[in-house]
Amino acid sequence: MTTPTFSRQAFEDVASFLPIFGANGFDFGTWVLRQGSFPFVTYHPEVGRFVRTLERHGWVYESPDFLWGPWLRTPEAAGLLSGETLPGATPEQLARLLTVFARQERIVDGSRLEMYQSGVLLAALRRVQSWLEWLPTGDTDAPPSVRQEWLPPVPAGTPTRQARAFGEPARPRPAAPFVPPHPSSSLTFSEAAQRVHAFISQFEEGYFPPLLLLARLAEETGEIARVIAHQNGKTPKPGEDVGDLEMELADLLFVAICLANERGLSLERGFARMMDKIEQRDKDRWTKKVDLSWDVPETEVQNPSRPRQRPPTPRTPCPRSSSPKCPK
């Protein structure tokens, strides 16, 4: 796992972007809409330099040791993104939050811009800045037990339910940051559709038109093919990520849900109808498995690696003259 460097130099390098990103009129990023292409965001060069600074000091955790996707659904992430716990964030929590900032853009276009416009990024940098007043001098990294003693107090009057900590002036923003709900043990298609709609409906642009969503489905299918190719012999290009098949399949499902929501369709109802159809139409189409419900000796149960074999069926001898079906 990537080991973050919580030295004074690391805090100074990260906090040095606060006056840059917080300057009036700073153009952090802009959405580009072109005919015949997917919308994308062009970022200021300082944004790329900021991400490289985070990576240099290990503040961007590598997967699979830290999975930022599941972490986003935790109460810890919800508190940081809402601003409730951000004023008292520890260095480890700041590193996890900034890992999301650096990594999520590969999955969700414009996520870095959203984190900036919502004020979460600037509030996090203000928290990094506040740590400099409490960190010991020198570049020696301290163990976590000592870092807990450095925790600076939350400034009096700091808003607890806003992302703009430490007296940041309010600025207009399109909507409050989206905080995913805590996951349940299971998720139906209807619940997934509602969750997707809650996310999409906070933006004025809404859902993409159907033809663009169709192109997005084709794009995500290509991403799935790329991961499977990497898993089955193809060597990734230098610097190319092998990919995450689970995430790519989820991306495809997300776009399919968007298309169903945009058309006013129910995937839950459609899936039930589809299963009813194939369970009736194809019930005798394929070769069914042999019944494996026979008794298994205790020795085989204790050794699951040994392949199970069906015991021979005893045959009752019969005279050849009694039945023409008797084996000869």
Image: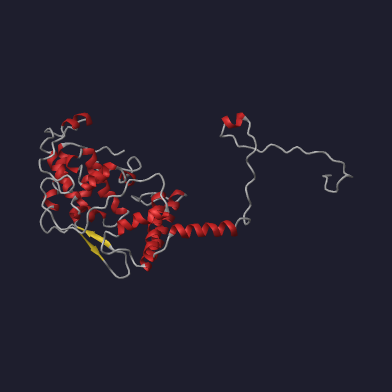
Q: Is residue 144 left or right of residue 12?
A: right
Indicate the quadrant containing the C terminus: top left, top right, bottom left or bottom right.
top right
Which residue is nearer to you in this view: 125 or 136? Answer: 125
In x, y percent, where is residue 224?
42, 55
Q: Is residue 34 left or right of residue 130?
A: right
Indicate the quadrant containing the N terminus: top left, top right, bottom left or bottom right.
top left
In x, y percent, where is residue 217?
40, 61
Is residue 57 among what the camera can see? no
Which residue is nearer to you in this view: 150 or 7? Answer: 150
Judging from the image, the colouring scheme is secondary structure
Q: Is residue 309 left or right of residue 40?
A: right
Q: Residue furthest right?
A: 321
Q: Residue at x 28, y 42 (%)?
A: 75
Is residue 121 among what the camera can see? yes
In x, y percent, where is residue 268?
45, 57
Q: Residue at x 27, y 59 (%)?
A: 202
Q: Is residue 34 above or below residue 191?
A: below
Q: Quadrant of residue 320?
A: top right
Which residue is nearer to you in this view: 133 or 10? Answer: 133
Q: Residue furthest bottom?
A: 35
